[in-house]
Image: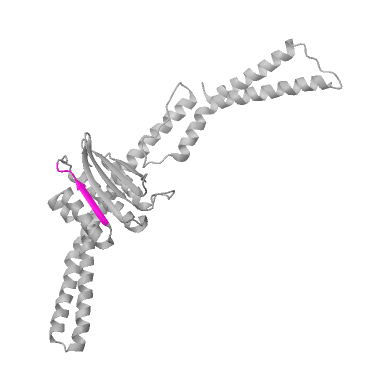
Amino acid sequence: MPLFWRIFGLNALVLGTATALLLWAPVTVSVPVLLTEAVILIGGLAVMLVANAALLRIGLAPLDRLTRLMTKVDLLHPGQRLPVSGHGGVAELISTFNDMLDRLEAERATSAARALSAQESERRRIAQELHDEVGQSMTAVLLGLKRAADQAPEPLRTELRQAQETTRESLDDVRRLARRLRPGVLEDLGLVSALTSLGTDFATHTGLEVRRGFDADLPPLDRETELVVYRVAQEALTNIARHADAERVELTLRPTPSGVVLCIEDDGRGTGAAREGAGIRGMRERALLIGAGLEIGSRPAGGTRVSLSVPTAVKGP
């Protein structure tokens, strides 16, 4: 039944019942109205309003559920749907809304895949330019400073040695940035070696204790899935360095009956009520690309836990 006729029928039922009571009930209205008659009329009106409100609430309940879902739906948390029951306008509206969510999630997954692919291509290009152009230029400057320091008198030699050391540190930073943009270890040696190198670099530059645990019998993953796992671990460690105020980090990769689970835990301040930023939303988008589940929350003992559950049956795009 369309919503219009449903509401009309509910109101007609209430008004018809009230009319029947007035016709056949032994109720009269005097002029002026007596107190007892006024009480009866007001009581009948109250019963009519309560009955009408209850029937309308029942009739409009599906729309209330739809409204609540609209206010909280997030395409990064797919699968939020309302059950469709019955026929008519309300059921058709809910079914249409569910179909719209299906299309939006599919379109977002496609556009996110294209955007992340372009992002990875741009990262590789920038990393190559940093290595080939900036790195080589700084190496040439470093060699020039070394030759000048070897030939300079002592007061100037000390300053040149300091400039040489500063240039060497800057060159190391450029190389580290290039490795972050394009994880060559991942392409050459695989996921476990890349995560090991990532944890080592993180511990070196932050001073935090990093405990690693990688099982030897991990199932094989395709290249796109390995890249997603690596980027999620990289972003999680970056968030720990920026916001967690932690002392220890645990990085593990374990097999499960359905795939593998990447887990990053710290002993910092936890997530609390903080809103998700661009980094975490980027992690969720990457997880959706390979059909993985991402869970981020506070640990009972304090700190934050990031868990990425990767099904091996799902391949990356």
Residue 19, given in percent of the width and then of the height, sits at: 70, 16
Eyeballing the image, is 242 above or below 147?
above
* Residue placed most toward the observer, 241 or 152: 241
Eyeballing the image, is 317 above or below 24?
below
* Residue placed most toward the observer, 263 or 108: 263
Q: Residue at x 20, y 69 (%)?
A: 171
Residue 44, given in percent of the width and then of the height, sits at: 72, 20
Q: Main secondary structure of the magenta part?
A: strand
As drawn, is 299 to the left or to the right of 124? right
Image quarter for residue 221?
A: top left
Q: How many labels, in total?
A: 0
* Region of the chain picked out in magenta, as a range: 209-216
Residue 126, given in percent of the width and then of the height, sits at: 23, 61
As drawn, is 124 to the left or to the right of 38? left
| Residue 213 sits inside the magenta stretch | yes
Q: Residue at x 17, y 75 (%)?
A: 142
Chosen colour scheme: one colour
The C terminus is located in which quarter? top left
Residue farthest along the front direction in this orientation: 301
* Residue placed most toward the observer, 165 or 28: 165
Q: Residue at x 70, y 13 (%)?
A: 20
Image quarter for residue 315?
A: top left
Residue 65, given in percent of the width and then of the height, sits at: 49, 31
Q: Residue at x 45, y 40 (%)?
A: 72
| Residue 297 sits inside the magenta stretch | no
As drawn, is 166 to the left or to the right of 285? left
As drawn, is 315 to the left or to the right of 243? left
